[in-house]
Amino acid sequence: MRRGDYAGALPLLEVAVRRLHGTGSVGEAYADFNLANTRYHLGRCTDVLALLEHSQQIQGPDPAIDNLRSAARKTCT
């Protein structure tokens, strides 16, 4: 994902989100955000807003979440 290989990151992040679901950990929050970000960059809007909301519920306010949410609302709705 950091190298811009969102397609390559997608399956890894999907597994991470499944495995971390329900832990309430910061790792779960980051995995949710990273999956949302990856899907957004791939033009796949499925659950992007829900993932961001869940990430924010765990980690609290974050400008990166707000920025991605704003961008997703413009293109994913």
Image: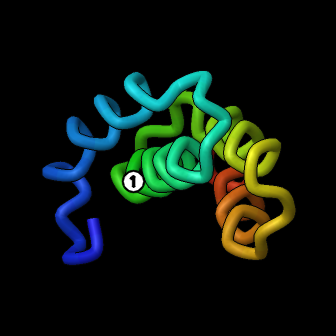
Q: Secondary structure at mark 1?
A: helix
The residue to which callout 1 is attached is 38
Q: Is residue 77 visible?
A: no
Quarter residue 47 falls in? top right
x, y percent for residue 42: 34, 51
Indicate the colouring scheme: rainbow
In front: 28, or 14? Answer: 28
x, y percent for residue 12: 22, 41
- Seen at 52% across and 38% down, the residue is 45
x, y percent for residue 73: 74, 50
- Seen at 73% across and 56% down, the residue is 69
Amino acid type indicated by mark 1: Thr
In front: 2, or 43? Answer: 2
Q: Is residue 52 visible?
A: yes
Left or right placement of residue 58 versus residue 5 in this view: right
In front: 24, or 62? Answer: 24
Left or right placement of residue 58 versus residue 36 in this view: right
- Seen at 38% across and 25% down, the residue is 19
Badge 1: how crowded within 10 Å, few (<14), some, or many (20+)? many
x, y percent for residue 27: 51, 50
In front: 65, or 28? Answer: 28
Left or right placement of residue 73 versus residue 15 in this view: right
Quadrant for the N terminus, please.
bottom left
Vertical position of residue 36 compared to residue 2: above or below: above
- Seen at 77% across and 50% down, the residue is 56
The number of callouts visible is 1
Vertical position of residue 16 compared to residue 40: above or below: above
Quadrant for the C terminus, please.
top right
Left or right placement of residue 55 versus residue 41 in this view: right
